Amino acid sequence: MKILLTTRREVIEQRNPIAILDLAAYLRMFGNSVDCYYLDQLHNQKIQSKVYDVVGLSVLQALKENTPVKDAIYLKKKFRTEVVVGGKWTQTIRDAQKTFLISNGIKVCVGPGEQYFVNRDIDFKEYPSWDRRDFETLNDVRADIMSTRGCPYHCHFCHNTEKNLSFFSAERTADNIELLFQLGVKRIFFCDDIFTLRVSHMEGLYNALQQRNINIEKRNEFFTHVNHINQETIKWIKIYKPAQVNVGIESGDDRMLGLMGKGFDSKTALEKLKMLYEGIQLPIGTLFIIGFPGETEESLRNTLHFIKRIQSIGGGWVSYYQPVRGTKGYEMAISRDKRMKVGHRNTSITYVDPNLTKKILFKYNYMMMDFSQNGFLRRRLIYTLIDILPYWLLTGVRLVRQKKRLKDSINNYNILPRSHDHKN
């Protein structure tokens, strides 16, 4: 069977399209012919002339609610063949959208894409490695990789739809890391929800890389979890020597941590962060979310105080809460504000709890992210300007700064521009 897999290219938060890279490798294992392209590449005359039995559209998250529907209709008209839409978005799709797609002859896959094409259980230990040809057709390569799927936690803000925890083989992950390094990536970003879940998993991958003489030290970054910071994981984090290890704290307020379903309190978080830093003496990135349903100015002050207490340990990133259908947080938000809209990027304010205003959220976000050495008077001036300037002007200026920071961060991982020669 001839299959085309496609997805939208992420322009700002550029990353590897892991879903279609995985699926392409898996389908070829069963004798299928598979091409991978970004949607914006499909105007190419060479691609337009190809005939496919199935076109698969992968959608992680829709920044504009009806964009995936329009993309699917476009593919149906363009290729006049079976079109199926899959990805995390399909698990939170509105009934009206699903009905519209089906009425236009487009199938909706809710669940693993592998099982849409191959009706059998997925053997993750035998899952095939990525193929260089897909990076050549996509004409792009990034740092992202996954050695696992799923997360054992169910935080109320998270839209991770992988309920089952699955581990790829060490050899498969080592293959993918080796390929990315060959293609010019500076360092690997493990985007597993929690890379440190199992010490045996970390050990197996490290040994597989050592056998290939691939040094991963200082060439990787990953996430851990407060509940998985212990002496054994610290030992292996030190062995990997990540450029940075990230921890999702989300809030410095115990009431908000409970509402978010985090499974720990601020005292535990602080103790574990100190333990981690003292154990590894490496950069730590902390992540926070403000504006979750039930947030108050008091809880924001508590989070700001927490961030100041850990400032010597490492920097952090503060996101605005984004309501996503299918999560408990979404239900909480819509019960508090019936006019609430589905969330988009975490750098924009989508949901404003009745306890707060956009200005309050913006000001605390700025204070929490302000790690500069500006003097007291200058800081007071900036905070005063935030109070008096219009919100649209503040967000415009902040967005420019955030885009630059994100671009600089991405450039730390990749040395290859969008168009490049993959020959080694």
Image (tube, rainbow, N blue to C red):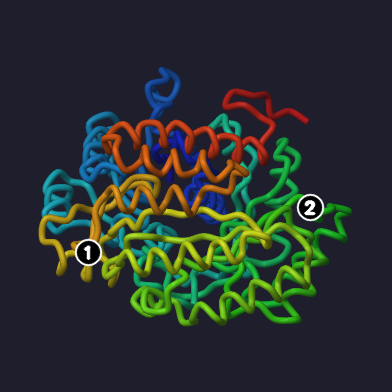
Of residues 334 and 13, the one nearer the viewer is: 334
Position in image of residue 329 (x %, y %):
28, 68
Mark 1 residue type: Asn
Q: Residue at x 30, y 58 (%)?
A: 109
Of residues 383 and 156, the one nearer the viewer is: 383
Q: For numbered disc 1, what is the local secondary structure? A: loop
The answer to which quarter of the image holds residue 259 is bottom left
The answer to which quarter of the image holds residue 286 is bottom right
Q: Residue at x 79, y 74 (%)?
A: 235
Q: Of all residues shown, which one is farthest toward the top?
A: 45
- Give neighbour class at mark 1: few <14, some 14-19, many 20+ (Cα, 10 Å): few
Position in image of residue 392 (x %, y %):
27, 34
Q: Residue at x 58, y 68 (%)?
A: 194
Relative horizontal placement of residue 37, taking residue 316 as reference (left or right): left
Check residue 280 in the rendering and tell me which mark sits there, or answer none: none
Position in image of residue 396 (x %, y %):
35, 32
Relative horizontal placement of residue 227, taking residue 256 as reference (left or right): right
Check residue 355 in the rendering and tell me which mark sits there, or answer none: 1
Whether residue 149 is visible: no
Whether residue 264 is visible: yes
Q: Residue at x 22, y 37 (%)?
A: 70
Q: For numbered disc 2, what is the local secondary structure? A: loop
Residue identifier under label 2 = 218
- Give neighbour class at mark 2: few <14, some 14-19, many 20+ (Cα, 10 Å): some
